[in-house]
Image (cartoon, grey):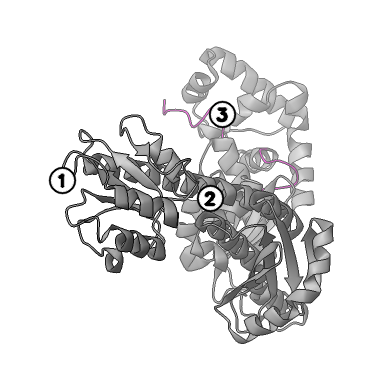
Amino acid sequence: MPPTLAAVAALPQLGLRSLTGPLPDAPVVWVAVSELEDPTPFLEGGELVLTTGMRLTSANAPAYVSRLVGRGVAGLGFAVGVIHEDVLPELLAAAREQGLVLLEVPRPTPFIAIGKAVSRMLAAEWYEDVTRAFQAQRELTRAALTGPGALVARLARLLGGWALLLDASGDVQHAEPASARDRAGALAPELTRLRRRPAASVSLAVPDDHIVVQRIGLGGRPRGFLAVGTDAPLPHAAHTIVGAAVALLTLQSETPRTGRDLRASLAALLLGRPDDGPSVPRGPVRVLACAGGAAVLDALESDPAGARCLALPLDGHSAVIVPDELSGTVESLLTGPIGVSAASSTDLATALRQAGEALAAAERTNRDVLYYTDLPGQGVLGLLEPDLAHAFADTLLAPLREEGLVETVRAYVAANGQGEAAARALGVHRHTLRARMRKATELLGRDPDDPAVRAELWIALAITSNRGDQIGQHGDSKSGPPGLA
C-alpha cells in the first residue's frame, strides 16, 4: 500500500500542518506540483497537490477546491510566505466545507523535499511488497513439494482469506478452510466464462467478499481452477502471490504429460516393438554405472541431454542408458566415479556388466571416469565364465594364501619375473624375495619363471582383485606397477 497522508504529514523534517483537522488514512500515490488554476487534466487521483497559490484568488478558490475534490486527490499542500503570507481564508473555508485535506507548507520546506520524501516512502513500500511476494513464493514452492492441498492451505493463510482448488468440471479438490467448499456452487457461471477465454481470469465482488478465479493449465482445455477470496480487493503483491500459486499448480498438472513418451516407450518394449517407442534411444548406446546414487537422477534432470537418458537406481549405484553421441556430455554432468561400457546396439545386459566392472576398477584406482575398453586384460578375462573362473583362481592361489605369499607372487608377476623390481615394490631385500619365491614354487608345484605359469597366475590374481563375482579388471600389484630393475 502507498504511504498515507497522515504518515507523510507526520514526517518532522517537512513541518507540515493540517488546517482541516485530523488526517485520514488516504493513500498518497504521488506528489504533483502545479500552479494551474485547473490542474485536474494532468492528475489521476490520489496525488498530494502542492501549490504556492500563484493563480488563486478569493473568487476562484471554491471552484478550485471543487475540481480537486472531484478528481479524488489525496490532499492539497499550500506554501505560505511565497505568494501569500497565509492560506487564503476562502480556500480554507471551501476545503473544510467540501472535505478536502489542506496542509500548510512552511516557507523553509521546498516542494522537492516533499516529493523526495514521498518517493522514498513509495520505494520502501514497493521493496517491502516485492520482498513479501518473494518470500510468499518460496513458501508456496515448499508447500507444493508436499502436494496441491498443502499449497492451497498455505495460499489461503498468506492472503488472510479462503482458497479453493477445483478440477476441470468444477468439483472441489481442496478447500481452505473447509467451509470454503460451500462457495463452489456460486462460482459455476464464472468457470463457464473461463473455459471460453483461455487467457483470462475473473474478478468479482459479492457482499463481504472480493473473489479472483483463475484457470490452471496451458492447453485449450483447462485442467482446473483456483479461486481465492478476501475481505478487501487484492493489492498488487497479493495478485503476484496468486499468480505464483497458479504457475505451480499448472506445473503440477502438466507434469504427467512429460512422462507420456517414457510410458509409451515402456509399452513398446513390453510389447516387443522397441522401434515404436518415442524415447527408446536410436543407434548405439552406452551404459554408465555411477556411484552417485540419487544425485545422479537430479543431475540428469538439470540438463536437456538428461531427457534422452534412461536411469535405473540399483543396489549401491545407478545405471544410465545414454545414446553414444551424448556419452561425453552426460559424463560431465555426473560426479564420479563412473564406469562406462563399450558401445552396443543390442546386448544391454552385457553393457551393464561391463559398466559395473569399469566402475569397480574406477573406485579401486580413484578414477573419475573409466571406460571398459580401457581396462587391461579385459579382452581375455571377459571371455571367462565367472563361477568357473573364481573356482580356478581360488584353487590355484589357495596354498599361497595359507602361507601369506599372495602379495609376493602378485608383485613378482607384475614385475614380469624381475626379482629386483618386485623386491623394491614390496620393500624387502632381494634375498628375502628369493626365499619367498622358492617357497611359492614348492607350494604351486610349478615354476613362476615359466611365462605360461605367470600368465595363469596373472589371470587368477586379476579375477580375485574384483568384488563379488565380477571379473575382468586389473590384476597387478595394488601398490602400483614397479619400476624396472
Where 322 sits versus 151, above or below? below
Q: Which mark is residue 16?
A: none
**What residue appears at the point 55 percent right and 60 percent down from the top-left corner?**
239
SS majority, magenta: loop
Tag 2 residue = 133
Instruction: Determine the secondary structure under disc 2.
Output: helix
Question: Which callout, 3 or 1, points at the residue further toward the start of the chain?
Answer: 1
- Give the alpha-carbon distance from disc 3 to disc 1, as whole Å: 109 Å
As drawn, is 111 to the left or to the right of 434? left
Q: How far apart are marks 1 and 2 (CA)?
A: 46 Å
Whole-percent x, y for residue 447 in the image: 64, 33
Q: Mark 1 points at which residue?
A: 83
Quadrant the C terminus occupies:
top left
Which amino acid does the dot numbered 1 rest on? Answer: Ile
- Give residue 412's mark: 3
* 478 is within the stretch colored magenta: yes
Q: Residue at x 63, y 26 (%)?
A: 407
Residue 235 x %, y %? 53, 57
Q: Does the magenta stretch include residue 121?
A: no
Give how far across and how far down residue 252 sits, in percent.
Answer: 66, 65
Q: Which class describes the residues within 10 Å of circle 3: few (<14), some (14-19), or many (20+)?
A: many
Of labels 2 and 3, earlier in sequence is 2
Q: Give the farthest residue toward the bottom.
A: 196
Q: What stretch is highlighted in magenta?
A: 465-485
CB atoms at circles 1 and 2 under 8 Å apart? no
Please state the horizontal and vertical placement of residue 189, each as a whole percent of the image. Answer: 72, 82
Res 375 seen here: no
Q: In this view, does 69 lie above or below 120?
A: below
